[in-house]
Amino acid sequence: MQSEKKEKKNKKAIMIKMTNKFINTYIYSAILISLLLTGCITVGPDYKEVDIKEPDKWQATLDRGLTDKKIDEARLDAWWETLNDKTLVKLEKLAAKGNIDVKIALSRIREERAMRGIEKARLFPTLNVSSTFEEREDSENLRNF
């Protein structure tokens, strides 16, 4: 008798778990479907696209020697020459010639730029062309059939 009661309780517990599982699945499915459908709703007929006006150039004031002029790349590469210190210029040239770490870093930069160019090329369409040619002649014995 005790085992029959336990068995009934176990069956009832299993049924409750299955029902809860079904209800949870139903709820999650309903939520997912409603989210998918709301993503596909089109904008109403009274929608007007907002025209955003972007400024032609930066509008903040520049101070402390900053200007909006284009930077001279050659001058930026040798910034220490603007200090007019001959010893500093000599030391920088000597360091640039003998510094292997800088050469390695520069070669890695060039390598990464080349890799970036290769990766960027994957964004563009490609065109593949192939052709085949086959010359065939039937046997004279097959022509009789």
Image (cartoon, helix red, strand yellow):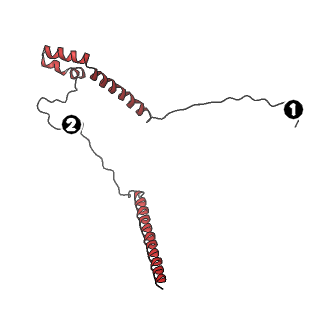
On the image, the x and y values in percent for residue 104 come to 31, 23
Q: Is residue 57 on the magenta stretch?
A: yes
Q: Residue furthest front?
A: 2
Q: What's the residue at 44%, 68% (across, down)?
A: 26
Compare marks 1 and 2 and give the one earlier in the sequence: 2
Instruction: Specify the quadrant of the image occupied by residue 77.
Output: top left
Q: Nearer the viewer, mark 1 or mark 2?
A: 1
Left or right: residue 20 compared with residue 106 = right
Q: What's the residue at 12%, 29% (across, down)?
A: 65
On the image, the x and y values in percent for residue 37 come to 43, 60
Disc 1 and disc 2: Cα gap in Å? 86 Å
Residue, disc 1: 141
Which mark, by number, is residue 58? 2
Point out the stretch of residues depicted in magenta. Answer: 54-58
On the image, the x and y values in percent for residue 139 come to 83, 30
Label 1 sits on a secondary structure element that is loop
Q: Is residue 20 above or below residue 4?
A: above
- Is disc 1 surrounded by few (<14), some (14 to 19) or many (20+) residues within 10 Å? few
Which mark, by number, is residue 57? none
Q: What's the residue at 29%, 21% (across, down)?
A: 103
**Count the marks: how many?**
2
Q: Report the amino acid beneath label 1.
A: Asn
Q: Report the amino acid beneath label 2.
A: Trp
On the image, the x and y values in percent for residue 106 come to 30, 24
Q: Is residue 78 on the magenta stretch?
A: no
Q: What's the residue at 73%, 28% (across, down)?
A: 135
Instruction: Specify the quadrant of the image occupied by residue 138.
Output: top right
Quadrant that contains the C terminus: top right
